[in-house]
Image (cartoon, helix red, strand yellow):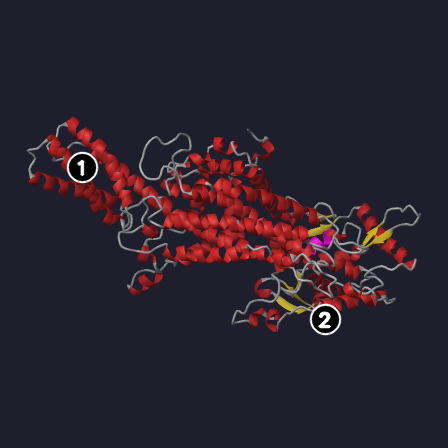
Amino acid sequence: MTLKRHSQSAHMNATLQLLGRVRDFKSKKRSIVLNGNDLDIASIVAVARHGVESTISTDECLAKRLEISVDTLADVISRKCVIYGVNTGFGGSADTRTNELIDLQTHLLQFIQSGIITAADKDPASNSEREPSHVMPLTWVRAAIVARTNQNLRGHSAIRKCVLKSLIDLLHNGITPLIPLRGTISASGDLMPMAYIAGAIMGNPDVFVQVGKGAQAIVMPSCEALKMSGLSPSGLGPKEGLGLINGTAPSVALASLALYDAQQLALLSQMLTAFASECLAGNVEWAHPFVHATRPHAGQIEVARNIRRFLKGSRFVVGLESQEASGDGLCQDRYSTRTAPQWIGPYIEDLLLAQHQLEVELNSTSDNPLVDTSKQEDGSSGKVYSGGNFQAAAVTSAMDKARLAIQMIGRMIWSQVTEMINPATNNGLEANLNATAQENFTMKGIDINMSAYMSELAALAHPVSAHVMSAEMHNQGINSLALISARRTMEAADLLAHMSACHIYVSCQGVEIRANHVRFLSTLRTKMKDFTANGALYGLGLKGSQLETLCASLLPIVQSSWYRANSNTWKDRVLSVVDAVMLTVNEYVAAQNPDCSVSTMIAFKKHFHSVVSSTAVEMFYPGPTVSPEEVAMQLGGGSAQIYTWVRSKLNIPTNCGLQDDPLYNAQNGLPTKDKKSIGSSVSMVYESLLKGEMMDVISEGWTQD
């Protein structure tokens, strides 16, 4: 069974498209024009994280649409109709009435602006104790502003264009409101976050904003920031306060940022699976198309296909082009790599659905009540309807799915890393991936860290939607908690980035050790096939044909004994190989040359030990090891990109134990320049992932179908 071409790499193509669009926005190849219909996740990321400017469309039809919406509301008000939030109270107090329409909008903001912001939040420089912030990251706020502007531009909210322009003016002038981190249940929209944004454009003296970035950033009352930037405070007409704050924009904006990260991490996890397979010298026949065509889930088929692409050209795996015919040990890989397509596949399908849900929401009208400007059957110019589009369950659904996907991917990555570090499961690599001749515990700390990250990630995976509490006089008896779910998903994505950085660091070390082992065994095989005085099998007094037979039987013993003796250093393995070989040699020589003396066998053992030992010394640290360029040439296309980025662009070297520790060098009078802790090196990988640098480079190497 086959799938249509356009769906074979649906997730990869969607992720690459997101990355490509953000790059284009940053390089000014695209502009962000808001019209209520075309906002996407890439645009949210570009504005929030990269300072790309957005503008409101100058289309006359859009301006007319907004004008008609405002006029329609005015007409309905003039007919003395009861309109929720315009001439009534709010929520469970909607049974009250008022004619003070303008003051009502201000009063709405007053009781909603009830979140906690501390003095330290308003003066970050004074927070020398690094207490946790009580305000949202500014990227979230910028994302919410552009999302809310776009939603209100649809013309169902009776908000004037000049008011919406004042939102965009905040972005253009580098003014970002401080919004409490907690306090919204995303039921009647995200009232509290948007109330602070609305307060900022109105110039509320007790709504604070940050102006500028970095060391030049200052926090001041919104009225001062508007004045400094030459902006006038916005007054609000009937329903404009409610129209600004009663909607899903903060939730869907933050969810968009979280999903952008999750999509990349999901694609990266497939490359990391290929990388782990190479470190473990895996038998990757599990990625063969036949296996997945027999169980034709689209996500599973895509993941297997991607992993095969990432492994193409690898010299460290078998089973990619042909099946392995012989060999000892496990005849198939462990579950963390072998079942990766079945494990990841369903969740990339979920992530695609989540992306669709969010991009629909970005271009939806999500406030209440809604203005219908169409001509009515009774001859009136329009009507106002109360509904519940502010209920952000679509966003909660997207985020709960995404967070579970992140947790499942994290669980797989955790297993892969522990298997690469553990000598019982890493197919012959040294314990803790120690690359030296001395006992070191190189990756043991990362092994512990990964369990800590995984435990926290698992705790976050529980659906937020299961924790809904009734609110606001039981009027909001069900509420979506969408922003909370999005916050948790951002945390989960960050934890997965931590784990991915560890995986990358471990894989780079692991594949170098594997490359050295392969080179060592290849060199030793050559010396064993050399039957001259320089050869490893010289001195037994056997004929050429006898040596050939003996050599053929010894080669697999050398390899298996070398890989099995991996609980200590490479230096300790030499004696294990010699002892394993001598068992077979003694039996063979006893059968073929019974007159061979004990002294001859002792001399041969000493000679063979010398050859194996000298070969190892020439191959392993502190001797010259395989260069990064040579390693990269033996890797599959996906792993080679990651490995080269780490070794050549980030300049993170192989960890060689105490010799690379800055404290050890300082204590022993050795140079400390460029010596970093393991944590500092992993942090560099993590930061590169966070900035998108690594994924930008990786994505450019994989064209869309």
Report the magenta residues as a range.
145-150
- Examine the structure image and report whether residue 198 is included in the region drawn in magenta: no
Residue in the image at 40% along x and 33% along y: 319
Q: Which one is nearer the viewer's eye here, 104 or 522?
A: 104
Q: Quadrant of residue 441?
A: bottom left
Residue in the image at 44% along x and 44% along y: 336
Which numbered disc covers residue 584? 1
Instruction: Tell me if 341 is positioned left or right of 112 in this view.
Output: left
Q: Which one is nearer the viewer's eye here, 201 or 374?
A: 374
Where residue 612 appears, as percent x and y from the top left, is 21, 42
- Examine the structure image and report whether residue 149 is included in the region drawn in magenta: yes
Which amino acid type is shown beneath numbered disc 2?
Pro
The answer to whether any part of residue 101 appears in the image is: yes
- Judged from this view, the residue extending furthest toward the top is 545
Give the CA separation, mark 1 to mark 2. Answer: 88 Å
The kind of secondary structure element at disc 2 is loop
Q: Quadrant of residue 469?
A: bottom right
Judged by depth in the image, the label closer to the viewer, 1 or 2, is 1
Please state, as top left, top right, bottom left or bottom right, where the N terminus lies in the image. top right
Instruction: Tell me if 563 is positioned left or right of 48 in this view.
Output: left
Q: How many marks?
A: 2
Q: Which one is nearer the viewer's eye here, 494 or 389?
A: 389
